[in-house]
Image (cartoon, rainbow, N blue to C red):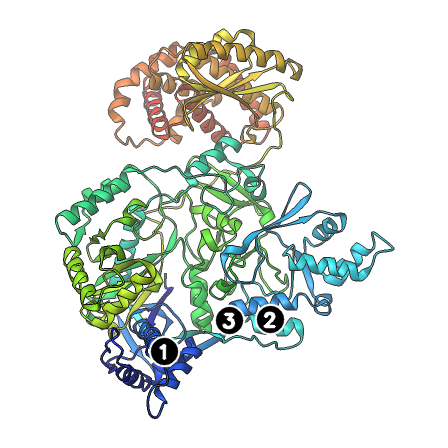
Amino acid sequence: MDAALIRATTIPSGIDLPPWPDLDGEDVTAWTDWLRRLWRIEEFAAAVHHASPVLSTEVRKVIDSPDRPRAAPRDLRRVIDAVARYLLRWQSRATPYGRFAGVAPARLAERASVSWGPGHQVLLRPDALALHNQIRALETRLPLLRNATVVTNNLGFARGSRWIVPAAATSTAGTGESLCDVEVELTAPVRLAIESGRKPVPFAELVATIAATDPDADLLAIETMLAGLVAHSVLVSSIRPPMTTIDPTAHLARVTGDTPGVASPPAAVLRLDCAVSLPGTVLREAEHAASLLARIAPPVSGWASYHQDFLDRYGPRTAVPVRDVVSGSGLGYPAGYRGSHRRNPHEIGTRATTLLALAQRAALHRQHEVVLDDALLARLTGEQQRQPVPHTELRFHLAAPAPADLDRGAFTLWVSGAARHAGVTAGRFLQLLDPAEHERFQRAYSHLPPQLPGALTAQISVPPLIPRMTAVARVPAILPILPLGEHHDSTACGERIEVDDLAVVADAHRMWLVSISRDRPVEPLLLNAVDLAGGQQPLARFLTEISTALCAPCRPISWGKLARHLPFLPRLRHGRSILHPARWLVQAADLPPSTASPREWRAGWALLRGTYRVPAQVLLGATDTRLRLDLDEPAHLTLLRRHLTRHTTAILTEPGDPAGWLDGRAHEVTLTLGRTPAAHPAARPAQRAARASTIAHRPGLSRWLYAKLHGRVDDILQHLPALGDAYSPASWFLRYHDPSPHLRLRLSLRDETHFAGTARQLAQWADQLRDAGVLAAYTLDTYRPEPRFGTGPALAAAEAVFAADSRTVLAHLHHDPVVRTAAGMITIAESFAADGLTWLLGHVDHRSHGAADRAARHRDTVIDLARSRRDTELRAALARYRTLAEADGLNLDQVLADLLHLHHARSIGPDLTCERSCLRLARTAAQTMLRRHPS
């Protein structure tokens, strides 16, 4: 995919910098001379002036003094310290910032090439926080609002008698500390305003709508009330530019009829004057590195249990509106989300312990580098078989002496980062591209490989929670827009997706979103790098993560929470790729105290450096805030000491090797990568999802009693006949393992008036089981039928199948679990489908995955059991259900697959690996049966 960027510093090649002064002493003259020499470098002086006009003015006061410096040593040291950090930033940090570093598109070509020009272009944009405050002020002006349109904030929702706008910023301080939900009483006028504003409506028209309900209404009072709803983000006005608006100042000029100024220095984004082409060798190595990262990455936190809870609550292939899923009456948000009540389990898995042992061994053997071989990769991967995310962005540094070395593969690729999907890093820089470049990137994003075939890729447009982050979150519209919390001019954008049109669907392997009106999967992307957990609306995060939540993510190697505190982590290499650089954690407590002299502190540092074997060249800091230090340079050691004084901890990382191919500049390549279709085909087309049912059989209000019985499930089943007539012929059960082994029992009542008596019977029976040490606890819950099995008569017939299958399982508990389950699968397939045995051959994966021997051993036993079982009631129930399911428009192949899945859950319990083994055993037996009796 030809969508690549390069970020690099603007420091000219071969520039002559003055030697570093002594930062420990108080030689004001030497400091001043150093500043004067630096300020003769026009590019650096201009960059500092743009980044900090106040600092630039202070430097000027010092160096323009004709006789002697006006600043006291203490004040001058502060200036020197700040300038030194800017100089290090200019030398070593490729993150675009002002005039210190910029970005340019790169091309994929047959050969590497690099050319630099003198014409870097500066794009000025208003300061994000100042712009936010200005917009808030403009929205308080009634004359402007009267000419504006407003729309209901689609992030809001009703909770009881109040309207909630989640995580709305109530302060303009620009920090996340003041974030909280806005709650507004749902009075009649407020409710009418919200309902009338579901689509953009002129403010004046909304005033008239509310006034029409009360002839004596005060129009100014209504306007003031609506202005208050705008101020509290219940309504969003057209004054506020959406995040797809790249030039917000021009937008404000259009809607206000004026060009308002922003009282703050503008922010700058630099387009580098350079042309870079990267050869196929780099692309292939980047793809290899990305595949390794996905292979050994841990799962996305919080989603495995959420996926299981969704299946338990709604069932597979049930389309549940997004708002219903994330609401307080639904599942809420996954663990780790803002406002979620869920908690991630604190488990240390095999992967984490393997990495911890790896780090410990490297430290003991004084190994700076660990090479990831196949055996180690297998231990890190375990038995997980997850499909990688369909696309990503890999960020990396290339170490090579010359462009020709890239062509012949003589380079090292140092991974610096990876994104959840394409466009996360590149999105904010699309505004810098010329029309041809923009079209190239848009074409690449429009053809990203989907997770599901035929999925519509969409672009979420949502304001970040922290106002100062809006500058890095603005991305032009390049895909169909999914707006959240914004006002979009419907005439100014193309295809749009509304959150109220989205539903959540899941099967055993994945979750996804579907557009109800389009009957099509939708895969939303959030094309900015604002932190999902701390900087984005939870709904935006949910929509962004769900499609690939159960995939193998492509992300930088994480050593785990415990490893974060280790003093040393080794470099991880595979071939030409450095997947993780060596890292050292230095604590101020391990060094001489702040009262120590410079000589004493350096002596202590020398001892620590020798023990830790820290190299001379390191990067100080984390991720995008790193500065390159030369630990043999006294001035840099002073900066390190001051960092430790302020922060008590210093993270030191080895830098990538020199990049002579790019004139030695600090840089970072961002490359868009897509999953290879041949190696990783998209998931099979999803069956059409059934709309979620609103039927809920609550205890005491229906003819169903639903109990969860926790304990030894096999023993509980042995005691089930002791329930007597409470366990009627129409009752049924399923086994579950999460959160602990339990039986889910649905007792069918003649009507709801029999609930109390049956519940009393159940309680007495449960007491007996508890006294016998069989039952730990039981609870009553709400039974929600799954619409995938049909509605009305079809659903009743399905429940009759569940009951008959439950009786069959009880009758065969004495058989081997796998054998009885495989035999039951044959019975169900034969009874539901006229060609059931052939169906098993065509629909069950025949790849053995190590189960061939077991299938061969038990095949005849399964056949004998399947042929000896009577199962008359089950066969009749299946035949009736097939007729009604077909009449109800259900996909019969999918229904049969679901019935086999539930039979396994009833007989053994939820276990995908075991279920596959049982299905393969049933298939092997069916193949033999057809061979012996072809007719």
- Answer above or below: position of 566 versus 428: above
Q: Residues within 10 Å of mark 3 (few under 14, many from 20)?
A: some
Q: Name the residue at 54% across, 15% down.
A: 731
Between residues 729 and 838, which one lies in front from this camera angle?
729
Which amino acid is tagged 1? Asp
Q: Residue furthest right?
A: 215
Which amino acid is tagged 2? His
As measured in the structure, the alpha-carbon distance from the residue carrying label 3 to the one carrying label 2 is: 15 Å
As measured in the structure, the alpha-carbon distance from the residue carrying label 1 to the one carrying label 3 is: 24 Å
Q: Is residue 932 visible?
A: yes
Horizontal and vertical percent for residue 707?
A: 52, 20
Q: Name the residue at 71% across, 47% down.
A: 186
Quarter of the N terminus within the rendering:
bottom left
Kindly report which numbered mark, 1 or 3, lies closer to the viewer in this rendering. 3
Between residues 143 and 749, which one lies in front from this camera angle?
143
Q: Is residue 284 visible?
A: no
Q: Which residue is mark 1?
A: 273
Q: Residue 393: name its quadrant.
A: bottom left
As measured in the structure, the alpha-carbon distance from the residue carrying label 2 to the one carrying label 1 is: 29 Å
Q: Which residue is mark 3?
A: 127
Which amino acid is tagged 3? Asp
- Label 1 SS: loop
Q: Marks 2 and 1: CB-CB under 8 Å?
A: no
Horizontal and vertical percent for residue 351?
A: 27, 41
Q: Residues within 10 Å of mark 1 (few under 14, many from 20)?
A: some
Q: Name the residue at 18% across, 69% down.
A: 632
The numbered disc on residue 251 is 2
Q: Residue 599: name its quadrant.
A: bottom left
Horizontal and vertical percent for residue 675?
A: 35, 52
